[in-house]
Image: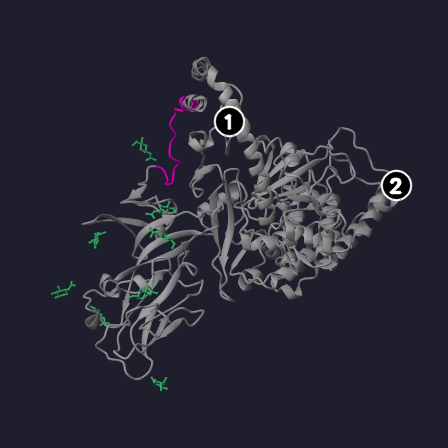
């Protein structure tokens, strides 16, 4: 009764309705028949991104049917990329079947083969299968460019499709997979072994794997229908208006959405990068429209009852707070009056419930611990000799306490791998706690390996992993807390207050280079970071650099068994060679670091809408300027003021060699670190003599984080100690 009353109360408290988040631009039509058409797709002028995304709503006897106008394809469904579900944007289409002969196949209308060339669409490699039906035939896909795709089919004695078809190639039907860059094809029907009757119908099609089940397919119906469902993957060009708007507005990710660059492995051909954006958890709508991701009112979801407390919707999440509405109080009073006798019974039930839950919780913890590879980790930690307690297994209760039950007010940030909370441990230590996203079971081993490897890294310029907790459904990682934000924020802060001195820039570059060099060569197993960018370089209370976010990094050993067809990284920092070959090497990290060097030198963002087309990418802008002898036009004013010409030129040529298109000719990280150290000494002999010209409000590694009006010049001793500890760490 209690429960029912409370439920009634909470229902009464949340009566206000919600509006659906916008999926289309302005007043554009949102639906054609049953199909929702999200921007960049659209119906009518001004509603779609470009001609490839134009949808025409055709009336037929069955109602309205959406058609992709330029590709002339019937659309069954369009879905936006789902970052949480790790799927690209897909379009379900109805694709024509290709016949060997009009006459023998009994078709009056012939369909032209579909071509998507010039668009940002591909036939999905993972979701489609190429299937062909006929006897003694070689079906070859034409026009596929990067590979030869086809299959061979033969039949039984009666020269017909055998009854129980599995489409194995010997039963009158064959199938094969396609390549990831397929944008167009036609089919060449070649006789395979002599006896091919010209009067029998042969046909081939590309079909949605999940819908083509040979054993239950009625092949006569299939042939007569003339169409089959297939799946396209779509994106938007990196240079298109919304892509640039997203980059310009809030680089790569806002609080309500997240974007990443996805590309396909095309061997050595021009790749097709596209931008994939998705609303973050707690938001819904269309990230391709500005302010298109709207906050979800979680309190409207009956699953989110606060069991007696009041549910309050906040941006991206909901809170349960004390205090009840007046309605609830009325109900409560009646409830207490009437239910006094029942209370004793309830108490008894509650106690036994509590007891059972406790038992269940312990069981669950054990299960999660096993599932998350806890045993594996314990084994690994015991087997390796050198680390004793580098990696600590935290108790889930302690971490809950530390983060105030993962209170939303403690959220520091949300990223691809999970949510980061600020927490205070029982001993007063401040930590950052990352709650991982669900990891798939097959990856547990890699995940554990990563924890084991990261916990062994002990470098002053790498964020320290203090430990983890595997007793919860989603594993928790505990890192040291780094208070002063990212290098990106520091460099590109809109206020003039923080001027980043040349010396600070050199120091940060040297520190990061040292850390990467350590990861590449000094750590027991080489580790590639794979996502070096200024937003992954954190600054501690003394503005020392700390390399963070090893979510995508891999140790070389693990990587050898892992073949990837999807290139991932951050647009603007991505090594073009890796993009084309899908082969990540240590030199790919060097390239990304080169972009960070240019960022430090020029003070400009890696992607900027303010620059011309071909200079939009900072790396190309920098290389073009170097070629034109315009280096000193693009160097940051502050650097020009403080730096020596010789040092700036050396720094620039180092950056240039890191950005070399051929990975082999880029210097290894170790050389980069040594060269940076040399430049730093060259630029700042003051470091040895103990006086400096610096009279600005700059923040440096050894000054306090809080800027005061009095600038304390560091004394000679602290310089020396910084220097020596720095050199020893390299
Ligand atoms: C959308 O429609 C409303 C009313 O139908 C109209 O007032 C408004 O101007 C329209 N907006 C645009 C951008 O056409
Ligand atoms: C109409 O829909 C029915 C059932 O979905 C289908 O069998 C029929 O072929 C459709 N007709 C046209 C003209 O698309
Ligand atoms: C179309 O795709 C959306 C998003 O994936 C999905 O929610 C919806 O159910 C799909 N519609 C149909 C008819 O399959
Ligand atoms: C679209 O394709 C996906 C992937 O194959 C499939 O799961 C889904 O059912 C399809 N939806 C429609 C409406 O055909
Ligand atoms: C099928 O017929 C169309 C005209 O209806 C013709 O253009 C086409 O060439 C024919 N194709 C074959 C393979 O005979
Ligand atoms: C094909 O065309 C012929 C004559 O042009 C017509 O009699 C027949 O009904 C058509 N068949 C179909 C399936 O439309
Ligand atoms: C054709 O098939 C026959 C038996 O079915 C086989 O003996 C012969 O080698 C085949 N020829 C070719 C060129 O595959
Ligand atoms: C093959 O056909 C038999 C009977 O027709 C059926 O029981 C069996 O399930 C079929 N096998 C497959 C793989 O569909």
Residue 410, image quadrant: top right
Mark 2 = which residue?
717
Our reading of the magenta stretch's main secondary structure is loop
Q: Nearer the viewer, residue 67 or 20?
A: 20
Tell me: 221 left or right of 646: left
**Magenta-drawn segment:** 10-26
Residue 623 included in the magenta stretch of the image: no
Residue under the image location 79 percent in, 29 percent down: 710
Residue under the image location 57 percent in, 49 percent down: 371
Residue 283: where, in percent of width, then height?
A: 46, 37
SS type, badge 1: helix
Q: CA distance from mark 2 to mark 1?
A: 69 Å
Tell me: 126 left or right of 696: left
Q: Nearer the viewer, residue 317 or 113?
A: 317
SS type, badge 2: helix
Q: Earlier in the sequence, mark 2 or mark 1?
A: 1
Residue 549: where, in percent of width, then height?
A: 63, 47
The N terminus is located in which quarter? Answer: top left
Q: Nearer the viewer, residue 290 or 97?
A: 97
Q: Does ligand 3 reach within 8 Å of label 2's beta carbon? A: no
Residue 309 is labelled as none
Mark 1 = which residue?
349
Question: Can residue 450 be seen here?
Answer: no
Tell me: 414 left or right of 168: right
Q: Nearer the viewer, mark 2 or mark 1?
A: 1
Residue 11 included in the magenta stretch of the image: yes
Question: Can residue 175 be seen here?
Answer: yes
Q: How many marks?
A: 2
Label 1 CA crowd tier, 10 Å (few <14, some 14–19, many 20+)? few
Residue 397: where, in percent of width, then height?
A: 64, 35
Tell me: 490 left or right of 316: right
């Amino acid at each position: 009764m209690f429960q029912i009353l409370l439920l009634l109360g909470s229902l009464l408290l949340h009566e206000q309705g919600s509006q659906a988040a916008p999926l289309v631009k302005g007043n554009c039509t949102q639906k054609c028949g049953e199909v929702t058409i999200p921007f960049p797709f659209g119906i009518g002028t001004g509603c779609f991104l470009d001609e490839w995304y134009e949808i025409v709503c055709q009336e037929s006897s069955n109602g309205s049917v959406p058609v992709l106008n330029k590709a002339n394809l019937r659309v069954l469904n369009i879905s936006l990329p789902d970052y949480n579900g790790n799927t690209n944007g897909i379009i379900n289409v109805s694709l024509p079947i290709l016949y060997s002969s009009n006459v023998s196949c009994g078709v009056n209308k012939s369909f032209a083969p579909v071509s998507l060339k010039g668009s940002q669409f591909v036939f999905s490699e993972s979701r489609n299968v190429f299937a062909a039906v006929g006897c003694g035939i070689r079906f070859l896909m034409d026009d596929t460019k990067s590979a030869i795709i086809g299959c061979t089919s033969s039949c039984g004695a009666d020269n017909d499709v055998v009854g129980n078809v599995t489409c194995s190639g010997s039963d009158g039907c064959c199938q094969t997979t396609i390549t990831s860059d397929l944008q167009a094809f036609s089919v060449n029907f070649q006789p395979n072994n002599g006896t091919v009757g010209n009067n029998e119908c042969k046909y081939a099609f590309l079909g949605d794997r999940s819908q083509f089940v040979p054993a239950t397919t009625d092949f006569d119906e299939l042939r007569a229908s003339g169409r089959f469902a297939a799946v396209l993957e779509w994106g938007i060009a990196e240079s298109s208006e919304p892509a640039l708007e997203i980059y310009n507005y809030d680089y790569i990710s806002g609080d309500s959405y997240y974007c990443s660059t996805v590309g396909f492995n095309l061997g050595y051909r021009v790749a097709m990068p596209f931008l994939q954006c998705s609303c973050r958890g707690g938001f819904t709508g269309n990230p391709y429209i500005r302010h298109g991701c709207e906050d979800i009112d979680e309190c409207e979801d009956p699953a989110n009852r606060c069991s007696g407390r009041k549910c309050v919707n906040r941006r991206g999440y909901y809170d349960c707070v004390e205090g009840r509405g007046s309605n609830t109080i009325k109900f409560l009073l009646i409830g207490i009056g009437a239910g006094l006798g029942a209370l004793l019974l309830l108490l008894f039930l509650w106690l036994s419930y509590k007891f059972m839950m406790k038992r269940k919780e312990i069981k669950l913890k054990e299960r999660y611990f096993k599932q998350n590879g806890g045993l594996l980790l314990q084994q690994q930690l015991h087997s390796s000799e050198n680390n004793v307690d580098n990696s600590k297994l935290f108790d889930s209760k302690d971490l809950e306490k530390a983060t105030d039950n993962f209170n939303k007010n403690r959220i520091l940030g949300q990223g691809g791998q999970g949510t980061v909370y600020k927490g205070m441990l029982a001993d007063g230590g401040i930590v950052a706690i990352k709650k991982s996203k669900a990891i798939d079971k097959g990856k547990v081993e890699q995940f554990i390996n990563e924890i084991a490897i990261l916990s062994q890294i002990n470098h002053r310029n790498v964020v320290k992993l203090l430990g983890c907790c595997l007793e919860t459904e989603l594993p928790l990682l505990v890192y040291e807390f780094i208070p002063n934000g990212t290098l990106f924020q520091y460099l590109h802060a809109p206020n003039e207050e923080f001027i980043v001195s040349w010396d600070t820039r050199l120091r940060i570059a040297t520190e990061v280079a040292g850390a990467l060099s350590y990861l590449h060569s000094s750590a027991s197993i080489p580790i590639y970071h794979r996502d070096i960018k200024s937003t992954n370089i954190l600054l501690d209370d003394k503005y020392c650099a700390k390399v963070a976010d090893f979510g995508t990094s891999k140790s070389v050993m693990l990587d050898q068994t892992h073949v990837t067809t999807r290139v991932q990284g951050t647009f603007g920092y991505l090594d073009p060679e890796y993009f084309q070959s899908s082969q990540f090497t240590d030199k790919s990290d060097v390239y990304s670091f080169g972009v960070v060097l240019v960022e430090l030198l020029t003070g400009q963002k890696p992607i900027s809408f303010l620059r011309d087309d071909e200079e939009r990418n900072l790396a190309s802008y920098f290389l073009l300027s170097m070629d034109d002898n315009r280096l000193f036009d693009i160097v940051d004013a502050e650097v020009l003021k403080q730096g020596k010409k010789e040092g700036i030129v050396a720094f620039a040529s180092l950056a240039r060699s890191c950005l070399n298109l051929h990975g082999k000719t880029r210097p290894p990280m170790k050389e980069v670190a040594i060269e940076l150290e040399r430049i730093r000494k060259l630029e700042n002999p003051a470091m040895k003599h103990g006086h400096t010209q610096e009279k600005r409000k700059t923040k440096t590694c050894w000054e306090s984080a809080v800027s005061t009006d009095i600038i304390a010049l560091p004394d000679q001793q602290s310089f020396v100690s910084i220097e020596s500890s720095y050199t020893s760490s390299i």
